Image (tube, grey):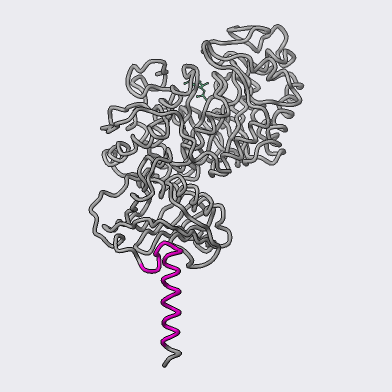
Amino acid sequence: MQLRYSKIYVLTLFLVLCSSIFGGNLSPDPDTLNNSKATPPSLIPLPQSVTWNEKMYKIPKLNNICYNKGSEKAANWLQELLRNANIKSKKTQGKSCGNWTIITDSSLEEQLGDEGYLLDINSEGITLQSATDAGLFYAIQTLRQFFPSTIERKQLSPTEISLHQVQIEDQPAYSWRGTMVDVARSFTGLDYLKTHVDRMALYKLNRLHLHLTDDQGWRIEIKKYPKLTDIGAKGSVKGGNSGFLTQEDYLELQEYALARNIIIIPEIDFPGHIYSALVAYPELNCEELSNIEPKRATPPELYSGYEVGWSKLCLKKKEIYNFVDDVLMEMAEITKGPWLHIGGDEIEDPLYETFVVKADSIVQQKGKITIGWEEVTKAEVSSTLISQQWNGKTESVVDVKVIESICSNFYFDHANTPGQENTLNWCKEDGVSLEDVYSFSTNDPNTIGVEAPVWSEYVLNNETMDDRFWPRSLAVSEVAWRGENKKDFSNFVARVSKHGERLNEMGIHFFRSPEVEWKITSNPKTPSTVFSDFE
Ligand code: TNX
């Protein structure tokens, strides 16, 4: 009898201790049970399945993140998230050891794919599960949107946070959820690209395509051809920025992006759009510069205009293939992702198809997968090549996978609203509205996803780049994540409206699309770096 009492006593003492150490997860705080009618957070992209509970979970003062083997990275990210909300936590590897539980379980892959996750918030705490790191990272990004937007600036007081109880099961419709930055016409430095990566990550975008070379400038260091950057990187469009990424910068950016589940896709645009290389290495030209027609510029002058389709490598010279091979070799060596983009747009030449087939096979020899603008499918390219559609006018002779960047839905150098200053309109006279992006739909089974480019002929600073990408990238995110399961547009814009403050807190100079009823009380800040010091 005595023994039984002392056992109960010890057990009670243990429970009380656990409860004070782990923030009360073993005996829920009465506040977690109150019936709050606060509106649930607006999530973008909307998860595939969400079941809200009316109750809230109040985050206790002390928190323990309990993670299993394989979940440490996610545990670090979660701790970072809590730190930004000024919430203290400790991490423990184990099972059922805290109010925050993170589980990597490979058997979930069948149900959730390689990017899906489960997020459960109930009166006991929060549980995140996935088969992969990527899935857990996305669960954390969803969770981030449960916190007030001031978390983006680390300005939350620890006592005020309650999370809506919910059950979420989520996974993307498309594996390719991308944006493209043209750093060639006007150079956007490493810092902005990292900031852009941070912003993409919150909305579960996972591919960043860099248009690294064009007539106006060459933006990536190639050790074997130093003049590409000594000379070719000096140019830009009128009023734009020159410069380039060193190979170190490029590696740093890729590491940074990979930690956020974003893969960088480098594009070296061949065989047209190449004038900056023709100035640096005149031997890539034909006799009498017959490959430059019309002569918008001639070496040694740089080109700072806006015309396209007037320069190309001298395709009848065998030597150009050494150049192409060397450049792609270095790019393959320094690129962590599986893809190399070879451009291939806007050029007329009888040897075009021959060039494309060779360039594709060079990329494959280097162990990478080729991507090209849709024109490359005029050639008998390999079946693994991925075509990036931009105007949908090419008569393809091959059946290959497709990334959709169709200009009427995804060209973000086009106006947000008709007549917006410094925008192009050749594809769509009245611009590409938020609704134009959101209404994208396809039944092509070859589509692996979508990508929105910002060409930078008229995008000469970071604020303008922000204005072109945001909020339209929120529509890219939802289109790519939900596929044909999109909700109606009015439901979407209502959620976008709630994200205005968050975009502001993040320091994004976003366009105030008239389709959205913005409720913004503060001014845009400098770019927030609270999620940037994590590697
Ligand atoms: C077309 S679409 C281009 C770019 C221009 C852009 C301007 C494509 C593959 N090439 O070279 O910058 O239009 O909107």
| Residue 213, image x, y percentages | 61, 23
Q: Nearer the viewer, residue 487 or 32?
A: 32
Q: Nearer the viewer, residue 445 or 109?
A: 109
Which residue shows up at 46% across the image and 52% down it?
88
| Residue 209, image x, y percentages | 55, 33
Which residue shows up at 41% across the image and 59% down it?
126
Image side of residue 534 versus residue 42, left or right: right
Instruction: Let me know if residue 439 appears in the view.
Output: no
| Residue 2, image x, y percentages | 43, 91
Residue 317 sits inside the magenta stretch: no
Residue extending farthest to the bottom is 1
Which residue shows up at 31% across the image and 41% down it?
495
Image side of residue 225 versus residue 430, left or right: right
Picture quadrant of residue 156: top left
Q: Nearer the viewer, residue 352 or 13?
A: 13
Which segment is the magenta one?
5-27
Q: Nearer the viewer, residue 370 or 144?
A: 144
Dominant secondary structure, magenta? helix
Quick one: quadrant of the C terminus? top right
Which residue shows up at 65% across the image and 37% down it?
335
Picture quadrant of residue 493: top left
Quick one: quadrant of the N terminus? bottom left
Instruction: Let me know if residue 458 appears in the view.
Output: yes
